[in-house]
Image (cartoon, rainbow, N blue to C red):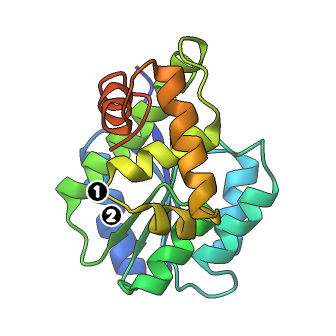
Amino acid sequence: MTAKRVLCIEDDAETAAVIAEELADRGYEVAMAHNGREGLDAIVRSPPDLVLADINMPVMSGFDLLARLTSMQPRFARIPFVFLTALADHDNELRGWQLGADDYLTKPVDFDVLAAVIASRLKRVARASIWPGHIDLVERERETLTWAARGKTFAEIGQILGLSRRTVEFHLDNARRKLGVSTRTQALIKAAIGELIEL
């Protein structure tokens, strides 16, 4: 089986080398870039299976890189994007989610957690082509279900996705009906069991 390819975009050479070694030991092929511009060029040239990016970098930040990738959709829409950063404050985390990050991990790196996140994100991509044919949830329904399952309130989900509380409730109710259950809690459980959402 071909090793999954992770692009690590990190401006600190020592941190980048440690991450690359850890991921290689876990069976991943690792490509490196040292700023957002190099990372963008690498993604366009040879799209990886997953991007792991720092936020504070010279030339182009991780936030700017993700914004550029999002503007280039749908070509790169299915590549999971994980922020790995020392910026552990609420505003930066919220900005990352709003830009479409798939996960957000803080330094110092816990490599067991990082490996679990990468495996989970790659598994989600692998099954994405299977489930939509069975239960036709639109992307907003998946997103609101996912955030609700992670314990976010309607207001927090709205803030992350840029939606009103009422719109969040609308998408959750649509998902509930499509899943054929009577309560939102049942919808969350069924979606999680069916691996329609990532917890």
The residue that appears at 24% across and 47% down in the rendered structure is 25
Q: Residue at x 53, y 60 (%)?
A: 101
Q: Amino acid at mark 2?
A: Ile
Label 1 sits on what residue type?
A: Leu
Between label 1 and label 2, give the one nearer the viewer: 1
Query: Is residue 194 in sight in this rendering?
Result: yes
Label 1 SS? helix
- Tell me the quadrant of the picture where the C terminus can be found: top left
Q: Quadrant of residue 69?
A: bottom right
Say above or below: 94 vs 80: below
Q: Position of residue 146 (x, y in %)?
A: 43, 45
Q: Earlier in the sequence, mark 1 or mark 2?
A: 2
Q: Position of residue 79 (x, y in %)?
A: 59, 44
Secondary structure of the residue carrying tag 2 is: helix
Q: Which residue is mark 2?
A: 19
Which of 99 and 83 lies nearest the eye of the viewer?
99
Q: Dividing the image into 4 quarters, which one contains the N terminus?
A: top left
Say which residue label 1 marks. Answer: 114
